[in-house]
Amino acid sequence: AGHSPQVKAFVTQDIPLYHNLEMKHLPGADPELVLLSHRYEELERIPLSDMTREEINQLVQELGFYRKETPDAPVPEEFQFAPAKPLPTLLPPQAPIADGKTPPKRDKEEHPDL
């Protein structure tokens, strides 16, 4: 699997401009974009080998990564944790939505003895 010059250009020239974007490069492996959540859990892997540099840039921006003007440019406050969207990813996992309990609201309305 040869690396396309497109992907190589993206990795060397574009990645430094993206905040929080890291490319783990395995020798001999096809380049993949691995998306991590803010807790560093793997969300998905996107193989880049057959994409053009243009397509990869578009994809990364659609995913919510912030592209800086220069590698040293400051990142605006709201993009500090991009692309981890503040909602709904930050909801605590220990809040089950359906746990079989009836919401407390319902009890007050049901008074058969009134």
Image (spheres, grey):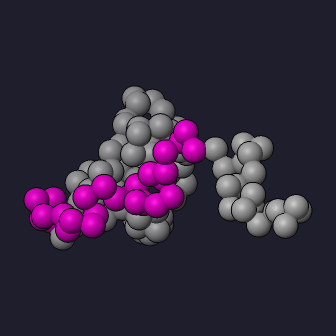
User: Would residue 95 appear left or right of 3 to someone viewing this image?
Assistant: right
Toward the top, the furthest residue is: 27
Q: Quadrant of the C terminus?
A: bottom right
Toward the right, the furthest residue is: 112
Q: Nearer the viewer, residue 49 or 90?
A: 90
Across and down, in percent, residue 99 comes to 72, 43
User: Would residue 61 appear left or right of 101 to someone viewing this image?
Assistant: left
Query: Which range of residues does the magenta coloring cover?
Result: 70-95
Across and down, in percent, residue 77 comes to 21, 65
Q: Nearer the viewer, residue 79 or 86?
A: 86
Across and down, in percent, residue 91 comes to 49, 51
Q: Nearer the viewer, residue 4 or 95?
A: 95
Residue at 29% x, 51% y is: 20
Count of marks, rendered view:
0
Residue 17 in sight from this viewpoint: yes
75 falls in the magenta region: yes
Residue at 74% x, 45% y is: 101
Q: Nearer the viewer, residue 11 or 16?
A: 16
